[in-house]
Amino acid sequence: MLNISENSIHNYIKKKDFKAFKVLEDAKAFQFSRRTFLIIFVVFGASMFLPWTQNIQTDGYVTTRSPEQRPQAIQSVISGRLERWYVKEGDFVQKGDTLVHISDAKSEYFDPNLLERTTEQLDAKTQSADSYEMKVAALRSQYQAVKEALDFKLRQLDNKILQAQNKVEMDSMDLVAFKTNLSIAENQLQRTTELHSKGLKSLTELQEKELKVQETRAKVTVQQNKLTNQRNELLNLDLQISSTEREYRDKLAKVQSDIQTALSSKLGTFADASKLRNQLRNYTERQERYYVTAPQSGYVTKTVTKGLGEMIKEGTDIMTIVPDRVDMAVEVYVRPRDLPLVQQNEKVRLRFDGWPAIVISGWPEASTGIFSGQVVAMDRFISTNGYYRLLVTPDPDDRKWPERLSIGTGARAFLLLNDVPLWYEIWRQLNGFPTDYYSEEKANPKGIKLKAPLKSVK
């Protein structure tokens, strides 16, 4: 075999009959020529100048942009005992369908006639308020009557004062007349005395004049006493006016106090009636909450609560409903250094878990099995994981996303940026340089016209 000996076995053994010799001959024939190496080098060098789309790759999951379309936990507003299930996991329910029945677990709500008894209390309070209203009306009428009686009494006293004043004037005139008569009688007595001393008048005439003076003086005294009494009566009438006004003011104040007391009682009754009305409404709403209904149409995916008879607290999750109609979106996270490279309506390529795809990140046109989207929302505050959150929705100009896509499905996102040569992308990746994003068009998107510099400034 090594051709060392002169005795060769070449003529006795056929190499074609052995597989090992055949493999060695085939391996010897498969050799690269210089031309082959040159062709490979040219093709590789030319491929380095092919356009490569720079992108930001990140992972995310399918969600929805509308909060009401996300999986919703059904909770009980009140605490109670689970009595009956009306649905099973996987059932489709319409909005308003009954899900579970809960009975009350608090002793103050055990009375089956609770609403009727509360209604009776409310009616009693309402009637009590009506009676207070009637009492207020009666007291106001009484107040008006007392006020009218005061006016009448004052007018009556004014008339009596006027009469008393007239009597005082008449008595004063009579007193003046009596005093004049007394002066005349005394003058006559004096002349009669003088004439009697001269013997011209008899003793009888003198005594008559003296008697007349006494009678006239008595009338003057009586008239003075009468005038004094009339003046005292006038003063008493003045005092009576003050006393009457004070008396009726006390009556009016008492009636006004009763009115205010009745109004206060009326308002207190209204407040109690309002509380009972509120309580009755709460009882009615509570009884309506015994049946938990579906807030929207969807599928029952998970029941948290166990079997019948279990106690449920208010705010406790009972089950989860996934809406049947969902506007899909993908929630992805990017690094803070990549956030300035992302803009609103930025194009995004997506690969969903469970859907086969061949992805060439730099040549999106050559990729298959991927879907298009666009950025519609960007958080302005960093998340707890140290990344910024983006929301991606389907691109209306491209094909629709899969119909069987469900919330929570994983996704791989490729945010498309600038087109650069392949050699530049390899060189950038090896050196760890940032993405070459700012091109001339994006740096000056509106085509701003720049003015020539001023030659001179005056």
Image (cartoon, rainbow, N blue to C red):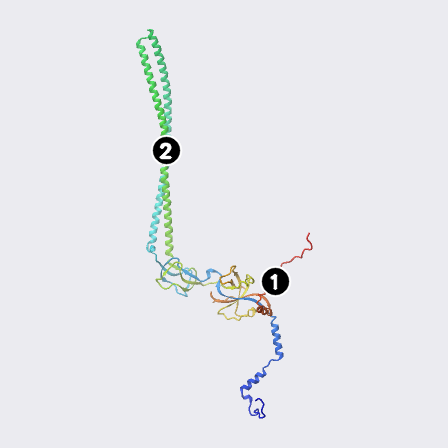
Q: Is residue 451 left or right of residue 270?
A: right
- The residue shown at (37%, 23%) is 168
* Residue 37 in view here: yes
Work out whether residue 140 can be spotted.
Answer: no
Q: Is residue 201 above or below residue 363?
A: above
Instruction: Identify residue for label 2.
Output: 246
Residue kind at label 1, given as amino acid type: Glu
Q: Is residue 7 above or below residue 332?
A: below
Which residue in the protein does label 1 denote?
Answer: 441
Residue 90 spot, x, y in % from top left: 41, 66
**Quadrant housing residue 449:** bottom right
Across and down, in percent, residue 457 comes to: 68, 53
In the image, farthest residue toward the top: 199
Up the image or down, 165 lies above or below 325; here it is: above
| Residue, far left | 204
The quadrant the N terminus occupies is bottom right
Farthest bottom residue in view: 7
**Relative vertical location of residue 255 with respect to residue 377 in this rendering, above or below:** above
Q: x and y percent of residue 173 in the render? A: 38, 20
